[in-house]
Image: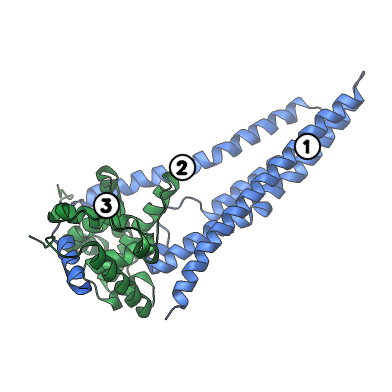
Chain colours: A green, B blue
Amino acid sequence: MNTEPVGEAPSRQDELYREAASSYSPALERLARGYEADPDRRRDLVQEIHLALWQSFAVFDARCSVRTWIYRVAHNIAASHVIREHRVNSRTLVGLEMLETLPIDNDGQRDADQRHALEKLLKLIQRLNPLDRQVIVSYLEDLDAASIAEITGLSPGNVATKIHRIKKILADRFHEGGHHAE
Amino acid sequence: MPNDAGDNAKSIWKNQHVEPVHVSLTELRKKAKKFERRVFWRNLREYAASVIVVAGFGFYIWKFPAPMARFGCVLVIAGVLFVVHTLHKRGSSRSLPAELTLCDCLEFHRKELERQRDLLRSVWTWYLLPLVPGLLVFLLGIYQWQMKRPGAQTRFITIHLGFTAVVCAVVFIAVGQLNQWGARKLQQKIDALNNLEREP
């Protein structure tokens, strides 16, 4: 798969991209799942993210960490994808505040299965507007509030409020019982 | 137990089965070229409508001998070229926007919305008004030319051209209003983002 031309000296851009791809590919794949449910379109989105990352490293100026850079580019590309797709099939996207008030689609039996818990989590994420999606996906990737603030541009206080809401929503929808990771 | 639920969700999220996509640099270079070609064709499609209008009014220059009508056609073509230039300058299709890497997500999102809002809000100045003088002069030129022809039916010509002018005016106003409405909707989204930023 990785067939590079022999003898061609890799540029800094190529090196940065290679390192990013080897460390962050699974995270980028998960991120794309939060933004696109359709597998074919998701594959396109992931490739679009990789392409944008590689192109972006041509102008990487180390003003922020590589991790912040990668997540910013990935989230920005994915958010543009959501906005573009949203124009085509106009499903209503909501914020965390609205999501808290929506009825809970709870099926305790099915939730026992981790796969279904993941499907439910993905459905929940995919209902959110792009900005809140960026926060929840970053939270699930275990980034701390300061990093999420740096990536999204929200104030740390705002991120903390959103994380509090996310935790409450998750507690409401994934309460009591067997959806632990196997 | 919000924390437990959060940890469970994180665990489910991070343990999901993923097949990371491996894209070689050669593939990326190919994709970048392909993407540039796609942007080129997309831009070309955006300009196709203008080419049709320019060709149409070019044909009218040849068809109508009246100098005033011909001058109107020239003005319409100039107006269309101005619209195309503005579209190109404002970059409706860009390959890799600089904001993508320089801005955080909130700023990027806002800049995208502001760009779209400004384009819609100023639709009168860059899209509609540049075409108005040319169309008016063209219609007046046609009116004069037809009235001078032997056996011209004054009433019919007046009603016919008057109706055409009214239809043009209605279409222009409708397009203008629709774009203003779109700009207002985008402004609401921008305000919501600004409020988010003001929150502590």
Spatial CA span between label 3 and label 1: 50 Å
B43 sits to left or right of B62: left
Q: Residue at x 79, y 33 (%)?
A: B163
Choose the circle earlier in sequence order: 2 or 1. Answer: 2
Q: Residue A3: percent from the left, percent from the top?
A: 15, 48
Q: Is residue B78 or residue B150 the one in the foreground?
A: B150
Rendered view: B3 above or below B149: below
State which mark lies toward you, 2 or 3: 3
State which mark lies toward you, 2 or 1: 1
> Would residue B133 be visible to someone looking at this image?
yes
Amino acid type assigned to the residue bearing label 3 in the image = Val
State which mark lies toward you, 3 or 1: 1
Residues behind callouts 2 and 1 on a single chain: yes
Amino acid type assigned to the residue bearing label 2 in the image = Arg
Rendered view: A6 above or below B192: above
**Mark 3: secondary structure:** helix
Residue identifier under label 1? B165
Judging from the image, mark 2 belongs to the subunit labelled B
Q: Residue at x 37, y 58 (%)?
A: A79
Residue identifier under label 3? A46
Residue identifier under label 2? B42
Q: Residue B103: percent from the left, percent from the top?
A: 40, 68
Residues behind callouts 2 and 3 on a single chain: no
Q: Is residue A112 or residue B138 the one in the foreground?
A: A112
Amino acid type assigned to the residue bearing label 1 in the image = Ala
Q: Residue at x 39, y 63 (%)?
A: A98
